[in-house]
Image: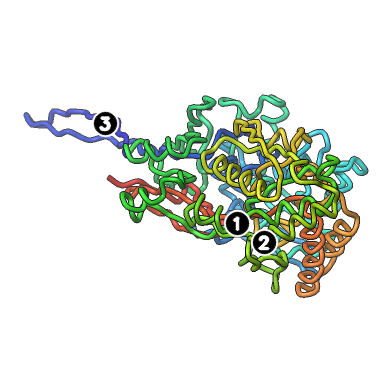
């Protein structure tokens, strides 16, 4: 929707009049999954936060509207023959929103801060390939010992402990964005507030009203500002997807970042090409708190997994917008031939129920003895999913209760080892490599290892894979790790994601892609 503020000036010229129309402000009202828990990009972790950070910041490299990795702040780079050193050359016209130049030191400052244990960045281990990163994050070395240095103002050098074939894709993630050192040091924890936040992306923060909207204005100092066609982006949170649908139909928003799948047939009938459902690199799964006595036996967790009818969830609850999942790592990922699946993937659900009963019996669980709490974040889709899971568990004598939590505090609750039995989670790939899914359950990954599962063999396999250069050999080691995971089942994969968006016919430049990235800088709005 185009919102216009027209200024007209009338000039007297030789007895005649000439009116000049002023420019119209282009406003993009963008539906988002939920409000961010923070605007400190080092502390963000959700897809909804990623959408926002992608507009506020620019990394060394970025993903374009087709999710291709293209130059960002760095206009070019070189990689050493051994793959251990990357040298980035920053564009001379890169500036912060306050006009300061973006320098290599801004990245050094940001990357050192990521690893500072006091910051507690949930994505800190994504940058562990950098020399000394893990040791710094564990408090064993000083931030200054990180393998990153500013050769000069416009040259950044990153040194790695081992070759990392997905590094460039990793550097498109918000954990790799720079920070404006002066404003962070001046304002401390308040640096993210409107008026304080200095960013280097296509847009800059104007206002943030929780449960209403985040207002961003076009950044006039952005190096590619001439090609940014939108003046204002309003990120509007919609935990109720049906509400976004209603406002989309009314023309009040131009896109919705998720769909009310219970109304999918209606949307396809009424909106046709404006409904975008595309395969996405992501897995919808159910973490299980393994330290609880009633759920500590892997046979109990495996039995629960067996009776979940993934076809019903994907096709009936999600109306075909998801695919049944029998692995943690989704299909179609790079660097992972011959993927691993649960061995009951193709078995009939009734046969699986019989096997599940036997497992529960072997574990000493009698029918009606086990009761579990199923927790989920506010969403009709999630509620319907967990309600269906509760019904499925009844088939083997497991009782369930449903617990709903508001989205803004939900993931923090799990990260902080909140008290739950089973809960809902999802992971969307930050880069196309199996490590990005398997790393979630490493023992030390307290940010995302919601079950607090620890397995020495799994950790050893992940460590070995991280030190292996040959991609085929590395894939084999990662498969071993996933086999351990699927046997122990600390989290139950149930569906693979598809991205679901409503996209107005007036919104141009939107390209469907497997990463579901759509920076506002690449979009425009037409009448």
Relative vertical location of residue 237 with respect to residue 138 in this rendering, above or below: above
Which quadrant of the rendered structure holds the N terminus?
top left
Q: Neighbour class for label 2 at 10 Å: few (<14), some, many (≥20)?
A: many
Question: Which residue sits at x=46%, y=38%?
Answer: 218
Q: Nearer the viewer, mark 3 or mark 1?
A: 1
Relative vertical location of residue 193 with respect to residue 223 in this rendering, above or below: above
Residue 209 showing in the rendered view: yes
Q: Neighbour class for label 3 at 10 Å: few (<14), some, many (≥20)?
A: few
Q: Nearer the viewer, mark 2 or mark 1?
A: 1
Residue 220 showing in the rendered view: no
Question: Which residue sits at x=76%, y=43%?
Answer: 450
Give the residue at mark 2. Answer: 326
Q: Nearer the viewer, mark 2 or mark 3?
A: 2
Which quadrant of the rendered structure holds the C terminus?
top left
Residues 504 and 387: in front is 387
Relative vertical location of residue 369 with respect to residue 16 in this rendering, above or below: below
Give the residue at mark 1. Answer: 310
Give the residue at mark 3. Answer: 6
Judge from the rendering whether residue 211 lies leftward or rightward of residue 89; answer left or right. Answer: left
What number of labels is visible? Answer: 3
Residues 32 and 312: in front is 312
Q: Residue furthest left?
A: 15
Question: Which residue sits at x=76%, y=41%?
Answer: 370
Label 3 vs 1, first from the N-terminus: 3
Residues 454 and 419: in front is 419
- How far separated are the C-alphas under marks 3 and 1? 54 Å
Task: From the top left corner, tell me how far across and down residue 463 is, in percent.
Answer: 86, 59
- Helix, strand or loop for disc 1: helix
Question: Which residue sits at x=66%, y=28%?
Answer: 191
Q: Are marks 2 and 1 in contact (CB under 8 Å)?
A: yes
Task: From the top left corner, tell me how far across and down residue 105 is, in percent.
Answer: 73, 44
- Helix, strand or loop for disc 2: loop
């Amino acid at each position: 929707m185009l919102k216009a503020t027209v200024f007209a000036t009338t000039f007297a010229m030789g007895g005649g009049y000439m009116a000049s129309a002023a420019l119209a402000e282009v406003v993009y009202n963008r539906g988002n999954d939920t409000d961010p828990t923070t605007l400190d990009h080092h502390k963000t972790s959700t897809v909804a936060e990623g959408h926002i950070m992608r507009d506020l910041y620019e990394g060394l490299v970025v993903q374009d509207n087709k999710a291709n990795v293209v130059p960002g702040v760095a206009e070019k780079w070189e990689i050493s023959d051994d793959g251990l050193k990357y040298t980035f050359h920053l564009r001379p016209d890169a500036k912060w929103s306050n006009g300061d130049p973006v320098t290599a030191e801004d990245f050094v400052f940001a990357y050192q801060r990521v690893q500072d244990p006091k910051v507690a960045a949930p994505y800190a281990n994504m940058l562990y390939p950098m020399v000394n990163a893990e040791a710094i994050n564990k408090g064993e070395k000083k931030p200054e010992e990180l393998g990153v240095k500013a050769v000069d103002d416009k040259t950044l050098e990153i040194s790695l402990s081992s070759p990392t074939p997905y590094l460039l894709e990793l550097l498109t993630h918000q954990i790799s964005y720079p920070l404006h050192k002066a404003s962070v040091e001046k304002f401390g924890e308040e640096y993210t507030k409107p008026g304080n936040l200095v960013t280097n992306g296509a847009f800059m923060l104007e206002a943030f009203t929780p449960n209403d909207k985040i207002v961003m204005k076009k950044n006039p100092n952005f190096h590619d500002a001439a090609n940014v066609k939108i003046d204002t982006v309003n990120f509007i949170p919609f935990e109720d997807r049906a509400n976004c649908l209603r406002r989309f139909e009314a023309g009040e928003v131009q896109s919705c970042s998720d769909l009310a799948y219970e109304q999918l047939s209606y949307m396809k009938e009424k909106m046709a090409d404006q409904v975008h459902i595309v395969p996405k690199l992501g897995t919808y799964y159910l973490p299980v708190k393994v330290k609880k006595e009633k759920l500590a036996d892997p046979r109990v967790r495996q039995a629960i997994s067996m009776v979940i009818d993934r076809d019903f969830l994907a096709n009936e609850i999600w109306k075909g917008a998801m695919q049944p999942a029998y692995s943690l790592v989704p299909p179609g990922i790079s660097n992972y031939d011959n993927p691993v699946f649960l061995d009951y993937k193709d078995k009939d659900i009734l046969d699986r129920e019989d096997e599940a009963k036997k497992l529960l019996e072997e574990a000493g669980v009698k029918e009606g003895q086990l009761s579990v709490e199923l927790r989920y974040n506010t969403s009709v889709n999630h509620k319907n999913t967990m309600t269906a899971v509760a019904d499925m568990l009844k088939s083997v004598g497991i009782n369930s209760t449903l617990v709903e939590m508001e989205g803004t505090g939900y993931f923090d609750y799990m990260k902080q080892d909140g008290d739950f039995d089973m809960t809902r989670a999802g992971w969307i790939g930050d880069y196309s490599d199996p490590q990005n899914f398997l790393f979630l359950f490493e023992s030390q990954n307290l940010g995302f290892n919601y079950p607090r599962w620890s397995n020495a063999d799994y950790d050893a396999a992940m460590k070995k894979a991280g030190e292996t250069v040959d991609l085929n050999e590395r894939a084999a080691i990662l498969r071993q790790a996933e086999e351990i995971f699927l046997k122990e089942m600390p989290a139950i994969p149930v569906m693979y994601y598809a991205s679901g968006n409503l996209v107005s016919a007036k919104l141009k430049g939107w390209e469907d892609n497997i990463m579901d990235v759509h920076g506002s800088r690449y979009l425009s709005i037409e009448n």
